[in-house]
Amino acid sequence: MFKISYQNESSGTKVVVEIGIVIALAVALSTITRLIQLPWGGSISIGSVPIAIFCLLRGSKAGVLVGALYGVVDLMLNPFIVHPAQVLLDYPIPNALFGCLIGFLHRLDTPIRLFPYILIISLAGCAKWFSHWISGILYFGAYAPVGQEVWIYSAIYNASHVIPETILCIVLLRFLVPYIPKRLSEL
């Protein structure tokens, strides 16, 4: 069982409420700001920004949880299912990886330092892309154009939505970070 330990019961309740709010906000923003919806799954929006902010404040453990839960909610709202393993590779796993890696920014004294900030968010985007890429190789090879290797097709297709979304996340967080409290006690 996954457990996040906190000082007292009210703190744990506060985190559960925060997780619900973050997931609701991420779903709303990914629906409202959907710039592009690709034909076989994947879209470009700013829905990952609230998750990234939460992970920045709460760390990797909470990031894994909120990412995976967001993936499950996204699956319920926008399902594209071809196989049970594909569901895991396209919904909870990439979002959990994203949340976990963004949570490492929590360990920095200040996420305003440019190099670690860009590096960690880029790694989070790469982890998300990798999970989608594996899913594409295993389950979406039939959509590859004739004569094109499945792994290349999957790489290009998934990069076409993960890279722009990661760049949006980097840019928007760069503007929002100065307004995010440095400690949770400041909330």
Image (tube, grey):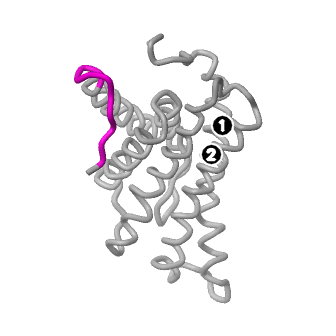
Number of other residues with Cα within 10 Å of mark 2, as a class: few under 14, some 14 to 19, many 20 or more: many
Residue 16 rendering spot, x and y as whole percentages: 28, 31
Location of residue 168 with respect to 163 vertically, above or below: above
For disc 1, the neighbor class at 10 Å (few under 14, some 14 to 19, many from 20) is many
Image: 33 above or below 160: above
Residue 90 position, x and y percent, is 44, 62
Which amino acid type is shown beneath numbered disc 1? Ile
Q: Which residue is mark 1?
A: 170
Q: Secondary structure at mark 1?
A: helix
Picture residue at 49% right of the left edge, 64% below the top: 39
Query: In the figure, residue 149 lies in which quadrant?
Result: bottom right
Task: Give the left or right position of residue 87, taking residue 170 as reference.
Answer: left
Task: Specify the farthest residue to the right.
Answer: 115
Secondary structure that dominates the magenta span: loop
> Can you say which quadrant of the picture contains the C terminus?
top left
Q: What is the magenta range?
A: 2-11
Residue most extreme to the bottom:
147
Residue on which the image places disc 2: 166
> Marks 2 and 1: in contact by CB < 8 Å?
yes
Q: Residue at x 48, y 41 (%)?
A: 60
